[in-house]
């Protein structure tokens, strides 16, 4: 009798526990519960306006339908539910909500950590419905062909959180206000001195710094912190004198090019061929806001392609009568070092600048020196900044490190240093062909590792136009890259 009582009591306790857990699961999976912990009110409002919150069928998609994996694997589901739940509760109770960077947390890149592909596929079993546009069919075909490397959220962030400008062509981009001072001629420097260039027909000027030629060791010294294999072996390089833009090409400068080349309203499929000297074809109108809403003016221009940067240099050369182009990697590193041979052109222990190790993860890295010269992950607030925020290097150049990474003229080859001959090399230009171009300098959203003088990177053309809805994809704009720009050099001889 006693054992029967214990058995019945155990069954009742087990059933009660299951009911309690099931109820807790239902309660903590409701939209109301999720919203009770949210401190970003706009996220809830944008969900209500989205197609997941308001649609012709009158259905609403619950928060957990996107932000948790399917329940098929209850262990995996419970793990992620606990992981996200504890993180949200910790942030709710112990973080300063006023200091959250909501703009950075609202990007597709950030959403990839808490939006699950299997959950998207559970609802959207048919990727080719009858009302799917041609652009959508093309994008879904690309997804199927490369299903392991593509995320639904990159194209469909707006379906869960409303964005009226998603996939909208920006036909008003580049509309200029009336200008007071219009230059009639470019500036003609007398000798090798720094000067301020003037763009004829506009009020735009920008400073070109005279960079005297010299010799330096290109690449990293063995044993330096954070060194990568493509920075070796070091090579002794001699560089001729040249002029280089004091800052990265600004929106003011790039918009002068955009407006002068008469591209407003033209579509990618209407690409005319380059014409005579006065008829350079410029960029088509972009989709969305290329400046990401951060502002234009003196901020560095971003999201244009390497091809667009090259055509800009061609246009600038013809407009001013000088020879402007992108810098070679060798010229770029020489200008960035400005006579130094360390990890940066300023003093300091590089390992103290990164958020690594228990102490710096807890208390943060030492930014007292690096923040004076570099806009990077620790001080950028998740966006580009005007050049006035930092000091110049010894050559008078700003933002050589950080703010935005910069296109170079060279094609990228990870082994190119080893292919150069031993001894002094004069004005190396890298390989003459390849699949990607070199990028240098690091950006506002990268760590002190990536903003080292010798750090090398490269373009990723296919990845950077993944969410471009046009057929064909734009050759002028990157839809999925916002941390790369460029600066120009002008040849002296």
Image (cartoon, helix red, strand yellow):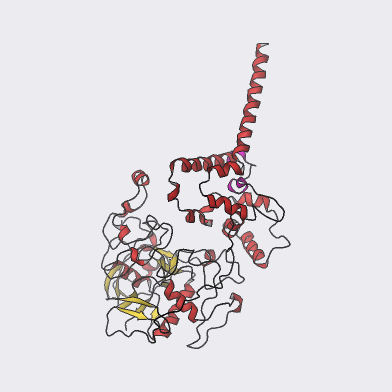
Q: Nearer the viewer, residue 385 or 154?
A: 385
Q: Quadrant of residue 180?
A: bottom left
In the displayed structure image, the side of residue 113 where residue 195 appears, left or right: left
Would residue 412 be visible to someone looking at this image?
Answer: no
400 in relation to 361, above or below: below
Screen quadrant of the C terminus: bottom left
| The stretch drawn in magenta includes residue 471 | no
In the displayed structure image, the side of residue 321 where residue 306 appears, left or right: right
In the displayed structure image, the side of residue 267 where residue 105 appears, left or right: left
Q: How many marks?
A: 0
Screen quadrant of the N terminus: top right
463 in relation to 160, above or below: below
Residue at 45%, 53% (x, y): give it.
101
Which residue occupies the extreme top position in the image?
1
Q: Quadrant of residue 424?
A: bottom left
The region drawn magenta spans: 59-76
Residue at 56%, 68% (x, y): give it.
287
Q: Nearer the viewer, residue 189 or 50?
A: 50
Residue 309: x percent and y percent? 45, 74
| The stretch drawn in magenta includes residue 61 | yes
Residue 118: x percent and y percent? 62, 49
Residue 332: x percent and y percent? 35, 70
Residue 283: x percent and y percent? 52, 76
Would residue 417 be visible to someone looking at this image?
Answer: yes
Q: Quadrant of residue 412?
A: bottom left
């Amino acid at each position: 009798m006693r054992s029967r009582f214990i058995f019945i009591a155990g069954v009742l306790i087990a059933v009660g526990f299951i009911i309690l857990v099931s109820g807790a699961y239902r309660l903590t999976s409701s939209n109301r519960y999720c919203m009770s912990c949210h401190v970003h009110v706009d996220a809830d409002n944008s969900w209500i306006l989205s197609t997941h919150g308001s649609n012709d069928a009158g259905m609403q998609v619950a928060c957990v339908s996107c932000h948790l994996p399917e329940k098929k694997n209850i262990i995996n589901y419970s793990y992620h539910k606990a992981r996200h739940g504890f993180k949200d509760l910790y942030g709710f109770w112990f973080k300063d909500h006023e200091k959250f960077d909501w703009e950075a947390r609202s990007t597709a890149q950030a959403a990839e950590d808490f939006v699950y592909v299997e959950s998207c596929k559970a609802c959207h079993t048919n990727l080719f419905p009858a009302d799917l546009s041609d652009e959508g069919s093309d994008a879904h075909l690309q997804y199927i062909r490369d299903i392991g490397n593509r995320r639904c959220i990159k194209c469909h962030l707006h379906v869960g959180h409303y964005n009226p400008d998603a996939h909208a062509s920006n036909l008003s981009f580049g509309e200029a206000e009336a200008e007071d001072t219009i230059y009639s001629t470019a500036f003609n420097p007398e000798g090798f001195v720094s000067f301020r260039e003037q763009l004829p027909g506009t009020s735009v000027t920008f400073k070109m710094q005279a960079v005297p030629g010299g010799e330096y060791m290109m690449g990293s010294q063995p044993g330096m912190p954070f060194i990568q294999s493509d920075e070796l072996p070091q090579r002794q390089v001699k560089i001729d004198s040249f002029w280089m833009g004091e800052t990265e090409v600004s929106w003011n400068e790039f918009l002068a090019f955009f407006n002068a080349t008469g591209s407003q309203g033209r579509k990618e499929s209407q690409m005319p061929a380059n014409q005579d000297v006065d008829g350079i074809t410029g960029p088509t109108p972009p989709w969305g806001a290329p400046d990401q809403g951060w502002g234009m003016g003196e901020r560095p221009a971003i999201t244009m392609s390497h091809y667009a940067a090259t055509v800009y240099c061609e246009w600038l050369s013809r407009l001013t009568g000088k020879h402007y182009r992108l810098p070679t990697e060798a010229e770029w590193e020489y200008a960035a070092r400005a006579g130094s041979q360390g990890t940066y052109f300023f003093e300091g222990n590089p390992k103290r600048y990164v958020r690594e190790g228990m102490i710096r993860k807890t208390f943060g890295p030492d930014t007292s020196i690096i923040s004076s010269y570099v806009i990077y992950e620790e001080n950028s607030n998740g966006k580009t900044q005007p050049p006035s925020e930092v000091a110049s290097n010894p050559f008078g150049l700003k933002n050589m490190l950080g703010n935005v990474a910069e296109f170079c003229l060279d094609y990228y080859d990870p082994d190119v240093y080893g292919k150069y001959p031993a001894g002094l090399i004069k004005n190396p230009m890298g390989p003459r062909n390849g699949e990607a171009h070199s990028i240098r300098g690091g950006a506002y959203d990268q760590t002190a590792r990536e903003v080292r003088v010798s750090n090398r990177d490269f373009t990723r053309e296919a990845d950077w136009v993944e969410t471009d809805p046009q057929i064909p994809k734009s050759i002028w704009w990157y839809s999925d890259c916002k941390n790369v720009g460029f600066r120009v050099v002008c040849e002296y001889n």
